[in-house]
Image (cartoon, rainbow, N blue to C red):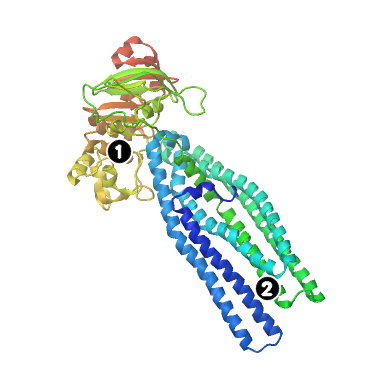
Amino acid sequence: MNQLIDKRLLAMPGMRRYLGILGILVFIQAVSIIFQARSLSVAIVNLWNLEPLKTIFWPTVIFAAAFLSRHLLTVAENRVFFPFVEKTSGHLREQLMAKIFHLGPAEIEKQGTGNIVTMALEGIDKVQTYLMLVIIKILDMSITPWLILLYVLFLRWEQAIFLFIIFPVIILFMIILGLAAQSKADRQYEGYQRLSNHFVDTLRGLSTLKQLGLSKRYADNVFKVSESYRKETMSTLKIALTSTFALDFFTTLSIAVVAVFLGFDLLDGKVMLLPALTILVLAPEYFLPIRNFANDYHATLNGKNALSAVLEILGEPEMKQTKVLKDFTWQPDTTLELDKVSYTYPKAEKPALKDLSVTIKGMKKIGIIGASGSGKSTLINLIGGFLAPDEKNRIKINGNELPHLNQQAWQKNFLYIPQNPYLFHATLAENIAFYVDHATPEAINNAVKRAGLAAWVKTLPDGLDTMIGEGARTVSGGQAQRIALARAFLDPDRRVLLFDEPTAHLDIETEAALKQDILPVFDNHLVFFATHRLHWIGEMDYVLVIDHGRIVEQGTPAELTAKNGEYVKLRSEMGATE
Protein backbone atom coordinates (compact mmCIF):
# COMPACT_ATOMS: atom_id res chain seq x y z
CA MET A 1 0.00 0.00 0.00
CA ASN A 2 2.99 2.31 0.53
CA GLN A 3 3.51 2.24 -3.24
CA LEU A 4 -0.11 3.22 -3.83
CA ILE A 5 -0.56 6.16 -1.50
CA ASP A 6 1.69 8.38 0.60
CA LYS A 7 0.76 7.88 4.27
CA ARG A 8 1.59 11.52 4.98
CA LEU A 9 -1.64 12.43 3.17
CA LEU A 10 -3.58 11.28 6.24
CA ALA A 11 -1.82 13.93 8.33
CA MET A 12 -3.08 16.78 6.16
CA PRO A 13 -5.60 19.03 7.97
CA GLY A 14 -9.18 17.92 7.27
CA MET A 15 -8.17 14.79 5.32
CA ARG A 16 -9.62 12.29 7.80
CA ARG A 17 -12.94 14.15 7.89
CA TYR A 18 -13.25 14.11 4.12
CA LEU A 19 -12.22 10.46 4.02
CA GLY A 20 -15.16 9.73 6.33
CA ILE A 21 -17.58 11.68 4.14
CA LEU A 22 -16.29 10.08 0.95
CA GLY A 23 -16.37 6.65 2.60
CA ILE A 24 -20.08 7.03 3.32
CA LEU A 25 -20.79 8.16 -0.26
CA VAL A 26 -18.78 5.26 -1.70
CA PHE A 27 -20.63 2.81 0.58
CA ILE A 28 -23.99 4.09 -0.66
CA GLN A 29 -22.69 3.90 -4.21
CA ALA A 30 -21.67 0.25 -3.71
CA VAL A 31 -25.17 -0.54 -2.39
CA SER A 32 -26.60 1.17 -5.50
CA ILE A 33 -24.43 -1.06 -7.71
CA ILE A 34 -25.81 -4.17 -6.00
CA PHE A 35 -29.40 -2.93 -6.36
CA GLN A 36 -28.69 -2.11 -10.00
CA ALA A 37 -27.35 -5.60 -10.73
CA ARG A 38 -30.14 -7.34 -8.80
CA SER A 39 -32.99 -5.38 -10.40
CA LEU A 40 -31.52 -5.78 -13.90
CA SER A 41 -31.23 -9.54 -13.35
CA VAL A 42 -34.81 -9.77 -12.07
CA ALA A 43 -36.11 -7.87 -15.11
CA ILE A 44 -34.16 -10.08 -17.56
CA VAL A 45 -35.23 -13.32 -15.86
CA ASN A 46 -38.87 -12.23 -15.87
CA LEU A 47 -38.60 -11.44 -19.57
CA TRP A 48 -36.97 -14.83 -20.17
CA ASN A 49 -39.80 -16.55 -18.32
CA LEU A 50 -42.40 -14.58 -20.32
CA GLU A 51 -43.82 -12.99 -17.17
CA PRO A 52 -46.39 -10.17 -17.48
CA LEU A 53 -45.00 -6.70 -18.20
CA LYS A 54 -46.12 -5.43 -14.78
CA THR A 55 -43.56 -7.78 -13.18
CA ILE A 56 -40.85 -6.06 -15.22
CA PHE A 57 -41.93 -2.46 -14.54
CA TRP A 58 -40.79 -2.09 -10.92
CA PRO A 59 -37.44 -3.89 -11.36
CA THR A 60 -36.80 -1.57 -14.32
CA VAL A 61 -37.68 1.48 -12.20
CA ILE A 62 -35.38 0.29 -9.41
CA PHE A 63 -32.61 -0.34 -11.94
CA ALA A 64 -32.98 3.17 -13.39
CA ALA A 65 -33.01 4.74 -9.90
CA ALA A 66 -29.95 2.75 -8.81
CA PHE A 67 -28.13 3.52 -12.07
CA LEU A 68 -28.86 7.24 -11.72
CA SER A 69 -27.98 7.21 -8.02
CA ARG A 70 -24.65 5.53 -8.73
CA HIS A 71 -23.52 8.16 -11.20
CA LEU A 72 -24.93 11.09 -9.24
CA LEU A 73 -22.91 9.87 -6.26
CA THR A 74 -19.79 9.94 -8.46
CA VAL A 75 -20.53 13.58 -9.24
CA ALA A 76 -21.24 14.27 -5.55
CA GLU A 77 -17.92 12.71 -4.50
CA ASN A 78 -16.00 14.97 -6.86
CA ARG A 79 -18.06 18.04 -5.92
CA VAL A 80 -17.48 17.39 -2.21
CA PHE A 81 -13.78 16.63 -2.52
CA PHE A 82 -12.62 19.14 -5.14
CA PRO A 83 -12.89 22.30 -2.96
CA PHE A 84 -10.87 20.56 -0.25
CA VAL A 85 -8.23 19.41 -2.75
CA GLU A 86 -8.02 22.87 -4.30
CA LYS A 87 -7.68 24.49 -0.88
CA THR A 88 -5.12 21.92 0.27
CA SER A 89 -2.97 22.28 -2.87
CA GLY A 90 -3.16 26.07 -2.51
CA HIS A 91 -2.00 25.81 1.10
CA LEU A 92 0.80 23.46 0.02
CA ARG A 93 2.00 26.03 -2.50
CA GLU A 94 1.89 28.79 0.14
CA GLN A 95 3.67 26.60 2.69
CA LEU A 96 6.31 25.66 0.13
CA MET A 97 6.99 29.28 -0.82
CA ALA A 98 7.07 30.32 2.85
CA LYS A 99 9.43 27.44 3.66
CA ILE A 100 11.75 28.34 0.78
CA PHE A 101 11.65 31.96 1.96
CA HIS A 102 12.65 30.91 5.50
CA LEU A 103 15.30 28.43 4.37
CA GLY A 104 16.73 31.07 2.06
CA PRO A 105 18.89 30.96 -1.07
CA ALA A 106 20.95 28.05 0.26
CA GLU A 107 17.94 25.77 -0.23
CA ILE A 108 17.35 27.10 -3.76
CA GLU A 109 21.00 26.49 -4.56
CA LYS A 110 20.73 22.93 -3.23
CA GLN A 111 17.49 22.08 -5.04
CA GLY A 112 18.12 24.05 -8.23
CA THR A 113 16.12 27.06 -9.38
CA GLY A 114 14.36 25.14 -12.13
CA ASN A 115 13.39 22.40 -9.69
CA ILE A 116 11.89 24.89 -7.22
CA VAL A 117 9.95 26.67 -9.98
CA THR A 118 8.70 23.36 -11.37
CA MET A 119 7.73 22.14 -7.92
CA ALA A 120 5.86 25.31 -6.96
CA LEU A 121 3.95 25.61 -10.24
CA GLU A 122 3.49 22.39 -12.22
CA GLY A 123 4.39 20.13 -9.27
CA ILE A 124 1.54 21.41 -7.10
CA ASP A 125 -0.86 21.10 -10.05
CA LYS A 126 0.18 17.45 -10.40
CA VAL A 127 -0.34 16.96 -6.67
CA GLN A 128 -3.88 18.30 -7.07
CA THR A 129 -4.56 15.82 -9.87
CA TYR A 130 -3.04 13.03 -7.79
CA LEU A 131 -5.27 13.79 -4.81
CA MET A 132 -8.44 14.02 -6.90
CA LEU A 133 -7.85 10.77 -8.76
CA VAL A 134 -6.24 8.56 -6.16
CA ILE A 135 -8.10 9.21 -2.88
CA ILE A 136 -11.60 8.48 -4.17
CA LYS A 137 -10.42 5.42 -6.09
CA ILE A 138 -8.55 4.05 -3.07
CA LEU A 139 -11.80 4.25 -1.08
CA ASP A 140 -13.72 2.71 -3.96
CA MET A 141 -11.24 -0.17 -4.12
CA SER A 142 -11.39 -0.60 -0.33
CA ILE A 143 -15.21 -0.71 -0.02
CA THR A 144 -17.05 -1.65 -3.21
CA PRO A 145 -15.46 -5.06 -4.00
CA TRP A 146 -15.97 -6.33 -0.45
CA LEU A 147 -19.64 -5.38 -0.31
CA ILE A 148 -20.16 -7.10 -3.67
CA LEU A 149 -18.21 -10.13 -2.40
CA LEU A 150 -20.45 -10.37 0.69
CA TYR A 151 -23.54 -10.28 -1.48
CA VAL A 152 -22.12 -12.92 -3.86
CA LEU A 153 -21.27 -15.06 -0.82
CA PHE A 154 -24.92 -14.81 0.20
CA LEU A 155 -25.95 -16.03 -3.29
CA ARG A 156 -23.33 -18.72 -3.95
CA TRP A 157 -20.23 -19.41 -1.88
CA GLU A 158 -18.21 -21.20 -4.62
CA GLN A 159 -18.00 -18.10 -6.85
CA ALA A 160 -17.40 -15.89 -3.81
CA ILE A 161 -14.34 -17.95 -2.80
CA PHE A 162 -12.97 -17.84 -6.36
CA LEU A 163 -13.37 -14.05 -6.53
CA PHE A 164 -11.82 -13.68 -3.07
CA ILE A 165 -8.75 -15.74 -4.06
CA ILE A 166 -8.16 -14.05 -7.42
CA PHE A 167 -8.38 -10.48 -6.06
CA PRO A 168 -5.13 -10.49 -3.99
CA VAL A 169 -3.35 -12.25 -6.89
CA ILE A 170 -4.27 -9.34 -9.15
CA ILE A 171 -3.28 -6.86 -6.41
CA LEU A 172 0.11 -8.60 -6.04
CA PHE A 173 0.69 -8.51 -9.78
CA MET A 174 -0.27 -4.84 -9.89
CA ILE A 175 2.16 -4.05 -7.04
CA ILE A 176 5.02 -5.81 -8.86
CA LEU A 177 4.38 -3.81 -12.02
CA GLY A 178 3.76 -0.72 -9.89
CA LEU A 179 7.23 -1.02 -8.34
CA ALA A 180 8.74 -1.18 -11.82
CA ALA A 181 6.64 1.79 -12.93
CA GLN A 182 7.58 3.71 -9.75
CA SER A 183 11.27 3.21 -10.47
CA LYS A 184 10.79 4.41 -14.04
CA ALA A 185 8.66 7.36 -12.88
CA ASP A 186 11.31 8.37 -10.32
CA ARG A 187 13.92 8.55 -13.07
CA GLN A 188 11.44 10.39 -15.30
CA TYR A 189 10.77 12.99 -12.59
CA GLU A 190 14.49 13.41 -11.95
CA GLY A 191 14.94 13.92 -15.68
CA TYR A 192 12.16 16.51 -15.66
CA GLN A 193 13.84 18.37 -12.79
CA ARG A 194 17.19 18.22 -14.58
CA LEU A 195 15.59 19.52 -17.77
CA SER A 196 13.95 22.38 -15.83
CA ASN A 197 17.22 23.38 -14.19
CA HIS A 198 19.12 23.29 -17.49
CA PHE A 199 16.43 25.27 -19.27
CA VAL A 200 16.08 27.96 -16.57
CA ASP A 201 19.83 28.37 -16.10
CA THR A 202 20.43 28.56 -19.87
CA LEU A 203 17.59 31.03 -20.32
CA ARG A 204 18.94 33.27 -17.56
CA GLY A 205 22.44 33.30 -18.98
CA LEU A 206 21.39 33.50 -22.63
CA SER A 207 22.76 37.00 -23.20
CA THR A 208 26.11 36.07 -21.67
CA LEU A 209 26.25 32.79 -23.61
CA LYS A 210 25.57 34.62 -26.87
CA GLN A 211 28.25 37.17 -26.07
CA LEU A 212 30.76 34.38 -25.41
CA GLY A 213 29.68 32.43 -28.48
CA LEU A 214 28.51 29.44 -26.41
CA SER A 215 24.77 29.59 -27.10
CA LYS A 216 24.81 26.76 -29.68
CA ARG A 217 26.78 24.50 -27.35
CA TYR A 218 24.25 25.02 -24.56
CA ALA A 219 21.37 24.56 -27.01
CA ASP A 220 22.83 21.14 -27.79
CA ASN A 221 23.09 20.48 -24.06
CA VAL A 222 19.40 21.31 -23.52
CA PHE A 223 18.52 19.06 -26.49
CA LYS A 224 20.45 16.13 -25.00
CA VAL A 225 18.77 16.55 -21.61
CA SER A 226 15.31 16.83 -23.22
CA GLU A 227 16.02 13.75 -25.35
CA SER A 228 16.98 11.85 -22.20
CA TYR A 229 13.70 12.95 -20.60
CA ARG A 230 11.77 11.78 -23.68
CA LYS A 231 13.35 8.32 -23.44
CA GLU A 232 12.51 8.07 -19.73
CA THR A 233 8.93 9.10 -20.47
CA MET A 234 8.54 6.47 -23.20
CA SER A 235 10.05 3.82 -20.95
CA THR A 236 7.52 4.69 -18.23
CA LEU A 237 4.66 4.56 -20.74
CA LYS A 238 5.74 1.07 -21.86
CA ILE A 239 5.49 -0.21 -18.29
CA ALA A 240 2.13 1.53 -17.80
CA LEU A 241 0.67 0.05 -21.01
CA THR A 242 1.98 -3.42 -20.13
CA SER A 243 0.47 -3.17 -16.67
CA THR A 244 -2.91 -2.03 -18.04
CA PHE A 245 -2.98 -4.84 -20.63
CA ALA A 246 -2.07 -7.49 -18.06
CA LEU A 247 -4.67 -6.24 -15.59
CA ASP A 248 -7.42 -6.19 -18.23
CA PHE A 249 -6.41 -9.69 -19.35
CA PHE A 250 -6.53 -11.20 -15.85
CA THR A 251 -9.82 -9.54 -14.89
CA THR A 252 -11.48 -10.53 -18.19
CA LEU A 253 -10.18 -14.09 -17.79
CA SER A 254 -11.50 -14.23 -14.22
CA ILE A 255 -14.96 -13.07 -15.32
CA ALA A 256 -14.90 -15.68 -18.09
CA VAL A 257 -14.04 -18.42 -15.59
CA VAL A 258 -16.95 -17.34 -13.37
CA ALA A 259 -19.28 -17.37 -16.40
CA VAL A 260 -18.14 -20.85 -17.55
CA PHE A 261 -18.63 -22.49 -14.16
CA LEU A 262 -22.00 -20.79 -13.67
CA GLY A 263 -23.00 -22.06 -17.10
CA PHE A 264 -22.10 -25.65 -16.19
CA ASP A 265 -24.01 -25.37 -12.91
CA LEU A 266 -27.03 -24.00 -14.77
CA LEU A 267 -26.96 -26.98 -17.15
CA ASP A 268 -26.68 -29.39 -14.21
CA GLY A 269 -29.49 -27.63 -12.35
CA LYS A 270 -27.26 -26.73 -9.39
CA VAL A 271 -28.10 -23.02 -9.55
CA MET A 272 -31.11 -20.98 -10.59
CA LEU A 273 -30.94 -18.43 -13.39
CA LEU A 274 -31.57 -15.36 -11.19
CA PRO A 275 -28.63 -15.77 -8.76
CA ALA A 276 -26.36 -16.92 -11.61
CA LEU A 277 -27.19 -13.88 -13.73
CA THR A 278 -26.85 -11.56 -10.72
CA ILE A 279 -23.36 -12.93 -9.99
CA LEU A 280 -22.38 -12.60 -13.65
CA VAL A 281 -23.55 -8.94 -13.74
CA LEU A 282 -21.69 -8.17 -10.49
CA ALA A 283 -18.40 -9.86 -11.51
CA PRO A 284 -17.22 -6.97 -13.76
CA GLU A 285 -18.30 -4.49 -11.06
CA TYR A 286 -16.18 -6.44 -8.56
CA PHE A 287 -13.02 -5.84 -10.62
CA LEU A 288 -13.95 -2.34 -11.87
CA PRO A 289 -12.52 -0.36 -8.87
CA ILE A 290 -9.08 -1.96 -9.18
CA ARG A 291 -9.07 -1.43 -12.96
CA ASN A 292 -10.01 2.24 -12.52
CA PHE A 293 -7.34 2.70 -9.88
CA ALA A 294 -4.65 1.02 -11.98
CA ASN A 295 -5.46 3.19 -14.99
CA ASP A 296 -5.15 6.41 -12.94
CA TYR A 297 -2.24 5.20 -10.81
CA HIS A 298 0.23 5.36 -13.69
CA ALA A 299 -1.18 8.73 -14.72
CA THR A 300 -0.55 10.16 -11.24
CA LEU A 301 2.93 8.82 -10.42
CA ASN A 302 4.47 12.22 -11.16
CA GLY A 303 1.94 13.76 -8.77
CA LYS A 304 2.99 11.32 -6.05
CA ASN A 305 6.66 12.11 -6.69
CA ALA A 306 5.94 15.84 -6.65
CA LEU A 307 4.05 15.49 -3.36
CA SER A 308 6.95 13.57 -1.82
CA ALA A 309 9.40 16.26 -2.96
CA VAL A 310 7.21 19.05 -1.54
CA LEU A 311 6.68 17.26 1.78
CA GLU A 312 10.42 16.59 2.09
CA ILE A 313 11.16 20.30 1.79
CA LEU A 314 8.33 21.18 4.20
CA GLY A 315 9.79 18.66 6.65
CA GLU A 316 13.27 20.19 6.65
CA PRO A 317 14.12 21.61 10.06
CA GLU A 318 14.24 25.36 10.51
CA MET A 319 16.62 27.12 12.85
CA LYS A 320 15.49 27.67 16.40
CA GLN A 321 16.42 30.46 18.81
CA THR A 322 15.45 33.17 16.33
CA LYS A 323 14.59 35.78 18.99
CA VAL A 324 17.81 35.82 20.97
CA LEU A 325 18.65 39.24 19.49
CA LYS A 326 16.17 41.77 20.82
CA ASP A 327 14.99 44.98 19.17
CA PHE A 328 17.95 46.12 17.17
CA THR A 329 18.95 48.67 14.52
CA TRP A 330 22.34 48.79 12.84
CA GLN A 331 24.08 52.04 13.84
CA PRO A 332 27.48 53.65 13.08
CA ASP A 333 28.82 52.29 16.39
CA THR A 334 27.37 48.76 16.04
CA THR A 335 29.84 45.85 15.83
CA LEU A 336 29.48 42.45 14.16
CA GLU A 337 32.09 39.87 15.11
CA LEU A 338 32.71 36.43 13.60
CA ASP A 339 35.04 34.38 15.82
CA LYS A 340 36.52 31.30 14.10
CA VAL A 341 33.26 30.55 12.34
CA SER A 342 33.01 27.33 10.32
CA TYR A 343 30.22 25.84 8.25
CA THR A 344 29.91 22.37 6.71
CA TYR A 345 27.16 21.48 4.27
CA PRO A 346 25.16 18.32 5.07
CA LYS A 347 26.90 15.16 3.78
CA ALA A 348 29.97 17.20 2.84
CA GLU A 349 33.37 15.83 3.84
CA LYS A 350 35.09 19.21 4.22
CA PRO A 351 33.76 22.49 5.62
CA ALA A 352 32.78 25.16 3.10
CA LEU A 353 33.97 27.83 5.56
CA LYS A 354 36.78 27.24 8.06
CA ASP A 355 37.78 29.36 11.07
CA LEU A 356 36.62 32.71 9.67
CA SER A 357 37.38 35.61 11.99
CA VAL A 358 36.50 39.22 11.19
CA THR A 359 35.16 42.23 13.05
CA ILE A 360 33.03 44.83 11.27
CA LYS A 361 31.97 48.13 12.80
CA GLY A 362 29.60 50.79 11.57
CA MET A 363 28.80 51.73 7.99
CA LYS A 364 31.39 50.15 5.72
CA LYS A 365 31.57 48.63 2.27
CA ILE A 366 32.99 45.12 2.62
CA GLY A 367 34.17 43.44 -0.56
CA ILE A 368 34.27 39.62 -0.56
CA ILE A 369 36.42 38.23 -3.33
CA GLY A 370 37.76 34.83 -4.27
CA ALA A 371 37.80 32.25 -7.02
CA SER A 372 34.62 30.39 -7.97
CA GLY A 373 33.74 27.90 -5.23
CA SER A 374 35.89 29.62 -2.63
CA GLY A 375 32.93 30.20 -0.27
CA LYS A 376 31.76 33.75 -1.08
CA SER A 377 28.07 32.86 -1.41
CA THR A 378 28.24 30.60 1.64
CA LEU A 379 29.57 33.51 3.70
CA ILE A 380 26.80 35.81 2.40
CA ASN A 381 24.20 33.17 3.28
CA LEU A 382 25.68 32.76 6.76
CA ILE A 383 25.65 36.53 7.36
CA GLY A 384 22.05 36.61 6.11
CA GLY A 385 21.09 33.93 8.64
CA PHE A 386 20.17 31.38 5.96
CA LEU A 387 22.87 29.04 7.30
CA ALA A 388 23.88 28.33 10.90
CA PRO A 389 27.57 27.90 11.86
CA ASP A 390 28.83 24.50 12.96
CA GLU A 391 29.37 25.73 16.52
CA LYS A 392 27.11 28.05 18.50
CA ASN A 393 28.05 31.37 20.01
CA ARG A 394 30.75 32.12 17.45
CA ILE A 395 28.88 35.24 16.32
CA LYS A 396 28.48 38.42 18.33
CA ILE A 397 26.62 41.69 17.79
CA ASN A 398 27.70 44.42 20.19
CA GLY A 399 29.32 41.72 22.32
CA ASN A 400 26.14 39.64 22.65
CA GLU A 401 26.71 36.03 21.67
CA LEU A 402 24.26 34.58 19.11
CA PRO A 403 23.78 30.95 17.98
CA HIS A 404 23.36 32.18 14.39
CA LEU A 405 22.17 35.24 12.47
CA ASN A 406 18.72 33.86 11.67
CA GLN A 407 17.39 36.41 14.13
CA GLN A 408 14.13 38.19 13.42
CA ALA A 409 15.58 41.50 14.64
CA TRP A 410 18.69 41.12 12.44
CA GLN A 411 16.75 40.15 9.31
CA LYS A 412 14.59 43.25 9.64
CA ASN A 413 17.79 45.24 9.17
CA PHE A 414 19.07 43.88 5.86
CA LEU A 415 18.17 43.54 2.19
CA TYR A 416 19.45 40.58 0.21
CA ILE A 417 20.14 41.13 -3.49
CA PRO A 418 21.17 37.92 -5.27
CA GLN A 419 22.24 37.34 -8.86
CA ASN A 420 18.62 36.75 -9.87
CA PRO A 421 16.16 38.63 -7.62
CA TYR A 422 12.82 36.89 -7.28
CA LEU A 423 9.92 38.72 -8.93
CA PHE A 424 6.45 37.85 -7.67
CA HIS A 425 3.40 37.52 -9.91
CA ALA A 426 2.18 40.98 -8.99
CA THR A 427 2.31 44.55 -10.22
CA LEU A 428 5.64 46.33 -10.60
CA ALA A 429 4.69 48.64 -7.71
CA GLU A 430 3.87 45.68 -5.44
CA ASN A 431 7.18 44.04 -6.31
CA ILE A 432 9.10 47.21 -5.43
CA ALA A 433 7.18 47.64 -2.16
CA PHE A 434 7.78 44.01 -1.12
CA TYR A 435 9.65 44.93 2.10
CA VAL A 436 7.47 47.95 2.97
CA ASP A 437 3.87 47.40 4.10
CA HIS A 438 2.45 50.88 3.49
CA ALA A 439 4.60 52.48 0.82
CA THR A 440 3.10 55.65 -0.67
CA PRO A 441 2.93 56.15 -4.47
CA GLU A 442 5.28 59.12 -4.08
CA ALA A 443 7.88 56.97 -2.30
CA ILE A 444 7.61 54.23 -4.94
CA ASN A 445 8.02 56.75 -7.77
CA ASN A 446 11.06 58.24 -6.04
CA ALA A 447 12.62 54.76 -5.65
CA VAL A 448 11.90 54.08 -9.33
CA LYS A 449 13.74 57.24 -10.37
CA ARG A 450 16.74 56.58 -8.13
CA ALA A 451 17.00 53.00 -9.42
CA GLY A 452 17.03 54.19 -13.03
CA LEU A 453 13.70 52.58 -13.92
CA ALA A 454 11.73 55.72 -14.81
CA ALA A 455 12.33 55.59 -18.57
CA TRP A 456 11.42 51.89 -18.73
CA VAL A 457 8.26 52.38 -16.64
CA LYS A 458 7.03 54.99 -19.16
CA THR A 459 7.14 52.37 -21.92
CA LEU A 460 4.95 49.91 -19.98
CA PRO A 461 1.25 49.79 -20.95
CA ASP A 462 0.03 50.19 -17.34
CA GLY A 463 3.07 51.85 -15.83
CA LEU A 464 3.68 50.75 -12.25
CA ASP A 465 0.44 48.71 -12.38
CA THR A 466 1.87 46.39 -15.06
CA MET A 467 1.86 42.73 -13.99
CA ILE A 468 5.29 41.06 -13.97
CA GLY A 469 6.76 37.75 -12.83
CA GLU A 470 5.62 34.09 -13.20
CA GLY A 471 4.33 34.11 -16.75
CA ALA A 472 3.37 37.79 -16.91
CA ARG A 473 5.47 40.48 -18.64
CA THR A 474 9.08 39.39 -19.06
CA VAL A 475 11.83 41.39 -17.37
CA SER A 476 15.50 41.44 -18.36
CA GLY A 477 18.30 40.67 -15.92
CA GLY A 478 19.29 44.32 -15.65
CA GLN A 479 15.70 45.43 -15.04
CA ALA A 480 15.27 42.75 -12.35
CA GLN A 481 18.38 44.05 -10.56
CA ARG A 482 17.06 47.60 -10.74
CA ILE A 483 13.76 46.44 -9.20
CA ALA A 484 15.77 44.90 -6.37
CA LEU A 485 17.68 48.16 -6.10
CA ALA A 486 14.44 50.14 -5.92
CA ARG A 487 13.43 47.97 -2.96
CA ALA A 488 16.61 49.10 -1.21
CA PHE A 489 15.93 52.79 -1.98
CA LEU A 490 12.34 52.43 -0.76
CA ASP A 491 13.25 51.14 2.68
CA PRO A 492 15.86 53.43 4.27
CA ASP A 493 15.48 51.70 7.65
CA ARG A 494 17.30 48.59 6.41
CA ARG A 495 20.92 49.58 6.92
CA VAL A 496 22.61 46.31 5.93
CA LEU A 497 22.87 45.29 2.27
CA LEU A 498 23.94 41.82 1.13
CA PHE A 499 24.96 41.57 -2.52
CA ASP A 500 25.74 38.07 -3.84
CA GLU A 501 27.43 38.69 -7.21
CA PRO A 502 24.47 40.78 -8.40
CA THR A 503 25.99 41.58 -11.80
CA ALA A 504 27.67 38.26 -12.57
CA HIS A 505 25.20 37.34 -15.33
CA LEU A 506 25.02 40.81 -16.93
CA ASP A 507 26.99 42.05 -19.92
CA ILE A 508 29.58 44.78 -19.39
CA GLU A 509 27.44 47.63 -20.79
CA THR A 510 24.42 46.74 -18.63
CA GLU A 511 26.63 46.34 -15.56
CA ALA A 512 28.34 49.70 -16.10
CA ALA A 513 24.98 51.47 -16.37
CA LEU A 514 23.64 49.64 -13.32
CA LYS A 515 26.75 50.43 -11.29
CA GLN A 516 26.02 54.18 -11.46
CA ASP A 517 22.68 53.56 -9.76
CA ILE A 518 23.98 51.00 -7.24
CA LEU A 519 26.79 53.14 -5.81
CA PRO A 520 24.52 55.83 -4.26
CA VAL A 521 22.65 53.20 -2.22
CA PHE A 522 25.94 52.26 -0.51
CA ASP A 523 25.97 55.57 1.38
CA ASN A 524 25.19 55.26 5.10
CA HIS A 525 24.87 51.45 4.87
CA LEU A 526 26.85 48.40 5.91
CA VAL A 527 27.45 46.63 2.61
CA PHE A 528 28.66 43.08 2.02
CA PHE A 529 29.46 42.74 -1.69
CA ALA A 530 30.56 39.33 -2.99
CA THR A 531 31.94 39.63 -6.51
CA HIS A 532 34.52 38.38 -8.97
CA ARG A 533 34.38 41.57 -11.07
CA LEU A 534 37.56 43.58 -10.66
CA HIS A 535 36.16 47.10 -11.02
CA TRP A 536 34.00 46.80 -7.86
CA ILE A 537 36.99 46.31 -5.57
CA GLY A 538 38.05 49.95 -5.78
CA GLU A 539 34.68 51.00 -4.33
CA MET A 540 35.19 48.96 -1.14
CA ASP A 541 36.43 50.19 2.24
CA TYR A 542 37.53 46.74 3.37
CA VAL A 543 38.20 43.51 1.50
CA LEU A 544 38.00 39.86 2.58
CA VAL A 545 40.01 37.50 0.38
CA ILE A 546 38.63 33.96 0.59
CA ASP A 547 40.37 30.83 -0.64
CA HIS A 548 38.97 27.31 -0.07
CA GLY A 549 36.68 28.56 2.69
CA ARG A 550 39.32 30.51 4.62
CA ILE A 551 39.99 34.22 4.90
CA VAL A 552 43.58 34.32 3.69
CA GLU A 553 43.84 38.13 3.77
CA GLN A 554 41.76 41.06 4.94
CA GLY A 555 42.23 44.81 5.09
CA THR A 556 41.72 47.97 3.08
CA PRO A 557 42.53 47.76 -0.65
CA ALA A 558 45.61 49.93 -0.06
CA GLU A 559 46.87 47.72 2.81
CA LEU A 560 46.38 44.53 0.79
CA THR A 561 48.09 46.03 -2.25
CA ALA A 562 51.08 46.94 -0.10
CA LYS A 563 51.33 43.35 1.19
CA ASN A 564 51.68 42.09 -2.39
CA GLY A 565 50.12 38.76 -1.35
CA GLU A 566 47.01 36.78 -2.22
CA TYR A 567 44.96 39.90 -2.89
CA VAL A 568 47.39 41.17 -5.53
CA LYS A 569 47.67 37.67 -7.01
CA LEU A 570 43.88 37.30 -7.20
CA ARG A 571 43.45 40.77 -8.70
CA SER A 572 45.98 39.84 -11.33
CA GLU A 573 44.09 36.64 -12.15
CA MET A 574 40.73 38.43 -12.17
CA GLY A 575 42.12 41.13 -14.42
CA ALA A 576 43.37 38.51 -16.85
CA THR A 577 40.03 36.70 -17.03
CA GLU A 578 37.68 39.71 -16.95
Mark 2: amino acid: Thr
Q: Is residue 103 above or below residue 292?
A: above
In this picture, residue 215 sits left or right of residue 291: left
Residue 226 placement: quadrant? top right
Q: Nearer the viewer, mark 1 or mark 2?
A: 2
In this picture, residue 287 sits left or right of residue 350: right
The residue beneath circle 2 is 278
Q: Is residue 72 above or below residue 472?
A: below
User: From where the camera sits, is residue 199 visible?
Assistant: no
Q: Residues within 10 Å of mark 2 (few under 14, many from 20)?
A: many
Q: Pointer 1 and pointer 2: residues touching (CB < 8 Å)?
A: no
- Mark 1 or mark 2: whose residue is earlier in sequence: 2
Q: Which residue is painted at 48% across and 66% down in the image?
A: 76
Q: Which residue is painted at 70% across and 77% down in the image?
A: 274
User: From where the camera sits, is residue 472 visible?
Assistant: yes
Residue at the far left: name it: 442
Provide the secondary structure element on which disc 2 rests: helix
In this picture, residue 535 sits left or right of residue 192: left
Residue 488 placement: quadrant? top left
Q: Which mark is residue 484?
A: 1
User: Residue 3, image x and y in percent?
Assistant: 60, 48
Residue at the far bottom: name it: 52
Provide the secondary structure element on which disc 1 rests: helix
